[in-house]
Amino acid sequence: MAMLLKKVWESVSNRATSFSSSSIGSVTTPPSYTESSSSLGAFDRLPIDVVLQIVRLVGPKDAARLSVVCKSWRPLVSDNRLWIYFLQNYHDTWDSVFFVETHLRSGYPIQTFSSPITELSFMRIYGQRVQVPGAVIVDGGSGHCKYGWSKNACPSGRSATFLEFGNIESPMYTRLQHFFATIYSRMQVKASAHPIVVSLPLCHYDDTEAARASRRQLKDAIYTALFDMNVPAVCAINQATLALYAAQRTSGIVVNIGFQVTSVVPILHGKVMRTVGVEVMGVGALKVTGFLREQMQQNNLNFESLHTVQTLKEVYCFSVSVMLHNVALSPTELGQIQGRLNLCYVAADYEAELYKDTQASFEVPGEGWFTLSKERFKTGEVLFQPSIAGVCAMGLQQAVALCMDHCHAAELSEDDAWFKTIVLSGGTSCLPGLAERLEKELHGLLPPSISNGIRVISPPYGADSAWIGAKLIGNVSYFITNYLDHAKLDIFTTVMFSFRTS
């Protein structure tokens, strides 16, 4: 193998042209190498696929050098297949890279590129994505905040949300500065060194002038607080849109089960369709957890705090997060997790489930074992039947059906399939069986003209879906390229990013 790699460089040195210091991202390249391309010296006798395998071994940096040192190697080294391979092994999965580079790199409003994959230079895209260390990602959350690096697989820490941070009687600007200063301190980075992507909690749902002013006020306060800390670039997007991006969609309905309420948000081409209407259901994660607490108290199950109850409810959510982020666990720990994946769940048929033996146990560290029976599925049922928890509100299936009916009537697009993809978001939405039950209920509520083609998607990254969506934005190639080229900042007047000007 060492001899083969040596021959690569010998071939280059024998046919070297003048050396160029051009960067990877500045090379304009054809998309694919063909047999009729220039001679590769001794490698002409090998099949092209074999030569590509060899070039993979030299790595992206040396592969790029081949393209600028020798014209004969440039078409092959610029082959998209080679750089797709390198991108597959760099931070994000290939399908997420392809999604953001074909749907999100142009900014807002979102434009889906009609050109085929062969017209994209993934060599250029790779070069753009590696030029800066990354962006700070902060998911404001409705229950708690998550923060970390865009180049990391998952959030590195959690805190209270910026709406609850510090003294709630203090001005919003003061609380925001304290909040972001704390995040930067915990991450041990300078605010002036990196751009930041912030997810905004869903609030002020209406399309009224007052609601628009409140949303604008919150966003302006965030920008002002960050720019006063010398943050170079800020992007603020609502959580529902980011959860949709994490599911690799730009249009659909996002069902966000937040801390206090559940929001049903129609999104078309990345924009919330407030004119259609955001449905708000008065049952959120807190009510679901509280209902489980009430059931445990009725059955004389003693516990230390609400956190214990939340742990029992979210055992599956924790397990999903562990598996998605490939956290290293011992065989014993993995066995324990697999044994408790379905502690709380949503029944496909609630009435039938009442007659089944559903008893299961789970050990909470420091508090001992807890045995649950019908509480396991009654907890999630409150989303579909709020009345069993004493809440006067429409069920989740009714809220989603109403939103879909409004989308259908609005005729915002020639293709009404855009609102038939429903993406679940939030920690409580990880409950097993929720997606299947919701899809079943919708088929029963809606006429076939609307219900045909419905697909309900479970949170693609568990409770971290919104954070992952923000991470995708922070890694997209146009974000990095235009962040570095301050001479071109005027192009951001039509996109989602705001830049600090000195």
Image: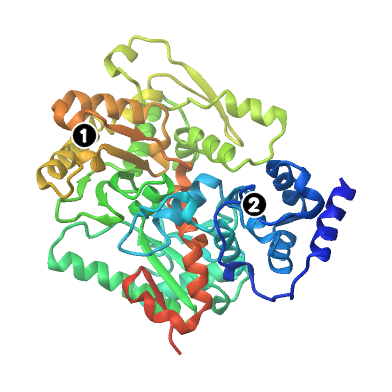
Circle 1: residue type: Gly
Q: Secondary structure at mark 2?
A: helix
Count residues near mark 1 (Cα–Cα under 10 Å), then give few for <14, some for 14-19, many for 20+. some
Q: In the displayed image of the protein, which residue is found farthest to the right?
A: 3
> In the rendered structure, which disc, 1 or 2, sits on the residue that comes first in sequence?
2
Q: Residue at x 68, y 63 (%)?
A: 67
Relative to 111, residue 265 above or below: above
Q: Residue at x 68, y 57 (%)?
A: 38
Circle 2: residue type: Phe
Q: Residue at x 13, y 68 (%)?
A: 209
Give left or right: position of 436 versus 500.
left
Relative to 293, residue 412 above or below: below
Please tell me which residue lies in front, 79 or 294.
Answer: 79
The quadrant in which the N terminus is found is top right
Q: Residue at x 42, y 80 (%)?
A: 489
Residue denoted by label 2: 86
Relative to 112, residue 13 above or below: below
Q: Position of residue 318 (x, y in %)?
A: 53, 38
Q: Is residue 417 visible?
A: yes
Count residues near mark 2 (Cα–Cα under 10 Å), then give few for <14, some for 14-19, many for 20+. some
